[in-house]
Amino acid sequence: MKTSNRRTFVKSSVVAAAAVLLAGSTMAESLVGEPTLAPVKFEIAKLTYQYADMEPAIDQTTMQIHYEKHYSAYVNNANEAIAAEKVQETDAKKLLANISKYSSKLRNNAGGAYNHELFWSLLRKPTQNNAPTGELLTAINKSFGSFEKFQEEFAKAAAGQFGSGWAWLVKDGNQLKIGSTANQDNPLMDVSKFKGTPILALDVWEHAYYLHYQNKRADYIKNFWSVVNWDQVAKLYKN
């Protein structure tokens, strides 16, 4: 075989082989479908503020312990349980919606990871006369009569939650509702009697306030209003 013919043959063979590989790859994709997504994994949320920024509503020491000890433990333990139980859900909301299928370890820690990440995002530096505006305020007034009445209802839910738990403002269709859940449950879970999409959350576990407020949960709830990030609540309401 002449050199020029040999080069042409080799080149043609390479092109043909690439075409076969490409065809095989395309066929495999058409048979298999979309690539399989990895199971959900919780990550430590980065704060947009410093621990001391919440003072005097929430003291620096409480914020640091709450974030670095309690929250990080929920995230680590949730991920351990996800791996051990071979969870297939690909995002946190799907996992929570099917949480009854899994262990109490996963229920408690996945709830803790999700609830705290939401809670951190809803805080900002304290401001006086801190209140919602626009569509969110209109919706609150429509559902509860006034912002002041809403605060009263929310405070009752937070103070009335026996033992550890959370108080919530949720969107349920076109309606806003207030309720509470025990421990690290939340309204997205299939095990929760109180359901909806959370747009505001308050942690009423003792580790969230006891260093500063001791047994005065009512004072903690009252001061919480000064650090609510209503812009973030409004974004959640619109989504």
Image (tube, rainbow, N blue to C red):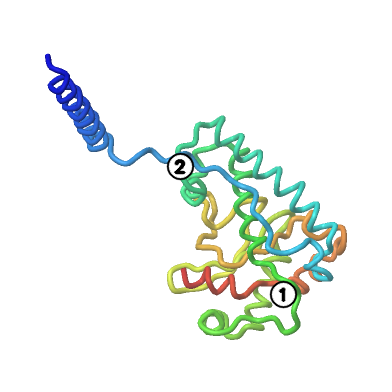
Regarding residue 206, the answer to whether it shows in the image is no
As helix, strand or loop, the secondary structure at mark 1 comes to: helix
| Residue denoted by label 2 | 89
Q: Amino acid at mark 2?
A: Glu
Nearer to us in this view, 93 or 14: 14
Which comes sooner in the sequence, label 1 or label 2? 2
Q: Position of residue 139 (x, y in %)?
A: 51, 80
Residue placed at 84% from the left, 66% from the top? 216
Around disc 1, counting alpha carbons within 10 Å, would you say few (fewer than 14), some (14 to 19), or many (20 or more)?
A: some
Nearer to us in this view, 79 or 50: 50
Q: Position of residue 232 (x, y in %)?
A: 59, 70
Q: Is residue 75 above or below residue 226?
A: above
Looking at the figure, which quarter contains the N terminus?
top left
| Residue denoted by label 1 | 225
Locate residue 96 relative to residue 54 in the image: left or right. left
Q: Amino acid at mark 1?
A: Trp
